[in-house]
């Protein structure tokens, strides 16, 4: 399982209306820390297949959604549950930190 790509057009369907919690990685191609965390995001998609939707959104191509959620620095990861942001993680953090945050929102 790989992360899905979300954009301004499908964000509502894929994230807000998802029946599972969703973690969205807001990133950009030029962002060094985004590249550092990318393999971890791929691993999370495999590790939590069926329990958590893992998505990536390029902030340069999708400014509306990034602006709506106040994304000012990247990478920023938002965890959505029931269409609401329940967690925000900023920066390239260790996988263990992400697992701790995710675990409290999947059940």
Image: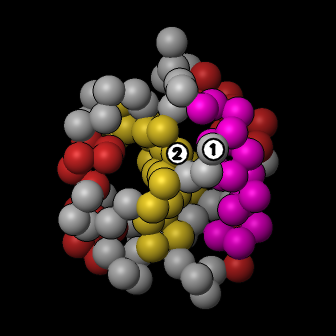
- Identify the residue at horizontal 69%, vertical 52% (top origin): 42
Residue 57 percent across, percent down from the top left: 44, 65
Residue 26 percent across, percent down from the top left: 48, 64
Q: Residues within 10 Å of mark 2 (few under 14, many from 20)?
A: many
Q: Tell us which disc is closer to us: 1 or 2.
A: 1
User: Any magenta on residue 42?
Assistant: yes
Q: Mainly helix, strand or loop, the magenta region?
A: helix
Query: In the rendered image of this protein, does residue 53 appear above or below residue 69?
Result: above
Q: How is the image coloured?
A: secondary structure
Q: Residue furthest bottom?
A: 30
- Identify the residue at horizontal 41%, vertical 75% (top origin): 59
Task: Write down the region rendered in magenta.
Answer: 34-49
Determine which residue is flagged by label 1: 1
Give the image quarter of residue 45.
top right
Q: Residue furthest front?
A: 1
Tag 1 near tag 2, CB within 8 Å: yes
Q: Is residue 34 visible?
A: yes
Give the image quarter of residue 63.
bottom left
- Identify the residue at horizontal 61%, vertical 23% (top origin): 103
**Element type where label 2 sits in the image:** strand
Badge count: 2
Q: Is residue 86 visible?
A: no
Determine which residue is flagged by label 2: 54
98 sits left or right of 105 in the view: right
Q: Residue furthest top?
A: 107
User: Any magenta on residue 5?
Assistant: no
40 sits left or right of 59 in the view: right
Residue 84 percent across, percent down from the top left: 28, 36
18 sits left or right of 42 in the view: left
Distance Cα–Cα, label 1 vs label 2: 9 Å
- Identify the residue at horizontal 32%, vertical 75% (top origin): 62
Looking at the image, is mark 1 or mark 2 earlier in the sequence?
1
């Amino acid at each position: 399982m790989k992360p899905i790509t979300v954009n301004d057009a499908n964000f509502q369907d894929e994230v807000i209306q998802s029946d599972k919690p969703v973690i969205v990685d807001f990133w950009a191609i030029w962002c060094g820390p985004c590249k550092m965390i990318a393999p971890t995001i791929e691993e999370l998609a495999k590790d939590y297949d069926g329990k958590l939707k893992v998505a990536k959104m390029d902030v340069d191509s999708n400014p509306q959604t990034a602006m709506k959620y106040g994304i000012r620095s990247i990478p920023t990861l938002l965890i959505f549950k029931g269409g609401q942001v329940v967690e925000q993680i900023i920066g390239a953090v260790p996988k263990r930190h992400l697992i701790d945050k995710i675990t409290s929102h999947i059940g």
